[in-house]
C-alpha cells in the first residue's frame, strides 16, 4: 500500500502564460498530467466519514473515485463520478469546489485541500479522450417527460430520468443545447466541445433535443401535456438581466453581460468573419464583482480592449467572484476600480448635427466613491457614498454584470403557476410547483446560482418525478 502524499501544497494547475492567453480564446487551464493527477490523488487520506461528500450538491463519492485513481484506473474513477454527475468534465472546470467539497477537506486544516475539482476534470477528460463507445440506453419504461431548458439543471434532470428509462425531450430556446454553459461561460474557461460531448452522451441515452423552441411562445406548457407528456420540468434558468436604473443605460455601447457574453460565446463575435455586432477595442468598464463580471472583463480583453476596468462598489474582500478567476483577470491586465458605484453614463451628442454617427455612443461614466459602513442583512458591510468625491471614467463600452432573474415568459403563459417576488417558481420540497405534474429546479427557482447547485436540483427533482409517475 502506497503511503499518502503529505505535501501541504496541492499540485499546481498548468496554464497558459498571462501575456499569451489574454490574446486568445483557448482554454486557460491546461489540466494535470497523469503523473500530477496520481501525485495529487495520493494526498487524499480516504477519511471514513467522507466530509468532502457533504459539500457536494450531487453527492459524488469522492474518496471512492480518488481511490480508483490511486490504482491508476482512470476509467473506473470516471464511472464512480458518472453515477452521481451527468456533467463531470463541466463541473471539473467551473464548479466552485473551494466553497463546496474542497472546503470540507481535512487536508485544508493545515495546508491546502486536495484538488478534487482538478482530479474530476482529469478523469473526465481521460474518459472523453480514450472511450469511443457511447453509453447504452436502458429499456423504455413507457413514460414521457418534457424538460424546458438545456442548462445544467435541465441536462442533469434529463440524464437522471433517461437512465431510468424515461422518454425525455429537452426543449431549448436557442439554436445550440447547453444553456448558460454555451452562452454564458467563455470558451477560455469551458470549451464548447466539452459541452457538446456531454450533450452527445445524453443523446446516446435517447434524450431528444428540440432547439429554437421558446416555451411560452412556440409552445406552451399546456400544449406539452396535450402532446402526451406526463410531467414537465422547468429548468429555464435566470436569463433576465438586471440593470442599475441610472441615466444613460440606453446609450449605444451599454450591454448587459448576458448579451455581451452570448454574442461572444454562442454567436462567435470574436471570429474575424463573424456577422454578430459587438463593440471591440477602446476602454471598457464592467460593473459588478461576480464570476460573470470576470468573464465579461476577460472577454473584453481578448476582443481587443485597450483598457478594462471592473467597477465594484465594495472592497476586494467582499468581491464574490472565485479567487482563481479574480487572480487570472488581474494577471491578464484587468484593473479593479474598487469602492466605486456608477451614478450616470454619458454619451456623445453633436447639437449642430443630429445625424452625426457618433451621437448616442458612450463616452463617460460618473461614479460615486464609496466607503464601507455597517453590515447589511446578509452580513456584508454596506457601501456608502463619500460626499463630494465623485470621479469620472472615460469609457467606450459599459457592461452591466450585477445579476439576473428568471424570465417571466413561462409564468405569464402558464395558468396557476405561482412565483415569488423575484420571479422564482415556488416549489415544495419535491420540486413540485403549484401546477399538477409541473416541476421546477435550478435558477428558475432560486435565481442565479452555481452550475453544480442547479445540477443538484435537476438530479433531485428527476428522482421526485420518478416517484410521482410511479405511483
Image (cartoon, rainbow, N blue to C red):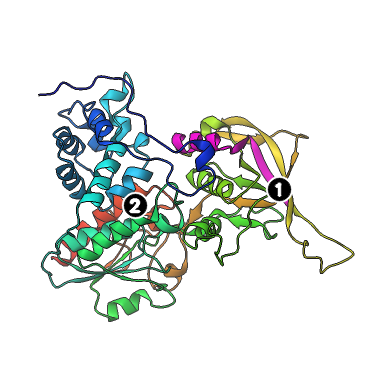
Foreground residue among 31 and 340 = 31
The circle on residue 62 is none
Foreground residue among 225 and 291 = 291
**Depicted 17 relative to depicted 45: above or below:** below
Residue at x-position 61% and y-position 30%: 373
> Taking 125 as reference, is 357 left or right?
right
**Depicted 3 relative to depicted 449: above or below:** above
Residue 224: percent from left, percent from top: 31, 76
Looking at the rendered structure, the number of numbered marks drawn on it comes to 2
The quadrant the C terminus occupies is bottom left
Task: Classify mark 1: helix, strand or loop.
Answer: loop
Q: Does the magenta segment cover residue 343?
A: yes
Residue 408: percent from left, percent from top: 47, 65
- Local crowd at mark 2 within 10 Å, few (<14), some, or many (≥20)? many
Residue 346: percent from left, percent from top: 75, 53
Specify which label sits upstream in the sequence, 2 or 1: 1
Confirm whether residue 158 shows in the render: no
Residue at x-position 25% and y-position 51%: 128
- Local crowd at mark 1 within 10 Å, few (<14), some, or many (≥20)? many
The quadrant the N terminus occupies is top left
Which residue is outermost to the bottom? 226
Foreground residue among 175 and 151 = 175
Confirm whether residue 324 shows in the render: yes
Residue 378: percent from left, percent from top: 48, 37
**Depicted 91 relative to depicted 141: above or below:** above
Q: Nearer the viewer, mark 2 or mark 1?
A: 1
Q: Which residue is mark 2?
A: 454
> Taking 21 as reference, is 286 left or right?
right
Where are the magenta residues, as a range?
A: 322-345
Q: Which residue is mark 1?
A: 395
Q: Does the magenta segment cover residue 27?
A: no
Foreground residue among 243 and 115 = 115
Amino acid at each position: 500500500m502506497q503511503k499518502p502524499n503529505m505535501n501541504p501544497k496541492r499540485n499546481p494547475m498548468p496554464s497558459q502564460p498571462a501575456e499569451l492567453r489574454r490574446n486568445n480564446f483557448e482554454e486557460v487551464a491546461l489540466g494535470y498530467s497523469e503523473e500530477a493527477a496520481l501525485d495529487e490523488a495520493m494526498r487524499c487520506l480516504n477519511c471514513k466519514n467522507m466530509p468532502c461528500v457533504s459539500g457536494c450538491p450531487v453527492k459524488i463519492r469522492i474518496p471512492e473515485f480518488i481511490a480508483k485513481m490511486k490504482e491508476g484506473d482512470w476509467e473506473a474513477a470516471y464511472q464512480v463520478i458518472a453515477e452521481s454527475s451527468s456533467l463531470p468534465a463541466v463541473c471539473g472546470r467551473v464548479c466552485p469546489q473551494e466553497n463546496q467539497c474542497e472546503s470540507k477537506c481535512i487536508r485544508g486544516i493545515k495546508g491546502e485541500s486536495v484538488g478534487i475539482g482538478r482530479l474530476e476534470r482529469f478523469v473526465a477528460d481521460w474518459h472523453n479522450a480514450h472511450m469511443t463507445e457511447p453509453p447504452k440506453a436502458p429499456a423504455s419504461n413507457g413514460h414521457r417527460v418534457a424538460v424546458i431548458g438545456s442548462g445544467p439543471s435541465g441536462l442533469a434532470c434529463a440524464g437522471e430520468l433517461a437512465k431510468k428509462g424515461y422518454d425525455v425531450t429537452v426543449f431549448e430556446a436557442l439554436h445550440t443545447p447547453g444553456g448558460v454553459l454555451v452562452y454564458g461561460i467563455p470558451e477560455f474557461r469551458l470549451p464548447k466541445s466539452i459541452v457538446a460531448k456531454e450533450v452527445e452522451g445524453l443523446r446516446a441515452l435517447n434524450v431528444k433535443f428540440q432547439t429554437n423552441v421558446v416555451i411560452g411562445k412556440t409552445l406552451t406548457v399546456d400544449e406539452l401535456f396535450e402532446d402526451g407528456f406526463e410531467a414537465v420540468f422547468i429548468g429555464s434558468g435566470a436569463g433576465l438581466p438586471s440593470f442599475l436604473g441610472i441615466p444613460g443605460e440606453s446609450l449605444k455601447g451599454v450591454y448587459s453581460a448576458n448579451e455581451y457574453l452570448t454574442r461572444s460565446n454562442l454567436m462567435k463575435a470574436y471570429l474575424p468573419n463573424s456577422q454578430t455586432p459587438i463593440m471591440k477595442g477602446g476602454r471598457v468598464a464592467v460593473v459588478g464583482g461576480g464570476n460573470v463580471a470576470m468573464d465579461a472583463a476577460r472577454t473584453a480583453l481578448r476582443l481587443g480592449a485597450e483598457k478594462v476596468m471592473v467597477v465594484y462598489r465594495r472592497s476586494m474582500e467582499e468581491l464574490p467572484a472565485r479567487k482563481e478567476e479574480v487572480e487570472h483577470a488581474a494577471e491578464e491586465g484587468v484593473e479593479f476600480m474598487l469602492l466605486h458605484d456608477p451614478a450616470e453614463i454619458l454619451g456623445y451628442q453633436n447639437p449642430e448635427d443630429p445625424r452625426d454617427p457618433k451621437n448616442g455612443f458612450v463616452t463617460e461614466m460618473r461614479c460615486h466613491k464609496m466607503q464601507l459602513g455597517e453590515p447589511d442583512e446578509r452580513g456584508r458591510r454596506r457601501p456608502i457614498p463619500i460626499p463630494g468625491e465623485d470621479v469620472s471614467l472615460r469609457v467606450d463600452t459599459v457592461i452591466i454584470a450585477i445579476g439576473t432573474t428568471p424570465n417571466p415568459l413561462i409564468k405569464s403563459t402558464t395558468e396557476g403557476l405561482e412565483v415569488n417576488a423575484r420571479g422564482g417558481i415556488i416549489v415544495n420540497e419535491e420540486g413540485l410547483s403549484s401546477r399538477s405534474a409541473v416541476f421546477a429546479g435550478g435558477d428558475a427557482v432560486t435565481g442565479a446560482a452555481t452550475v453544480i447547485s442547479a445540477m443538484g436540483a435537476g438530479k433531485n427533482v428527476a428522482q421526485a418525478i420518478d416517484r410521482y409517475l410511479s405511483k
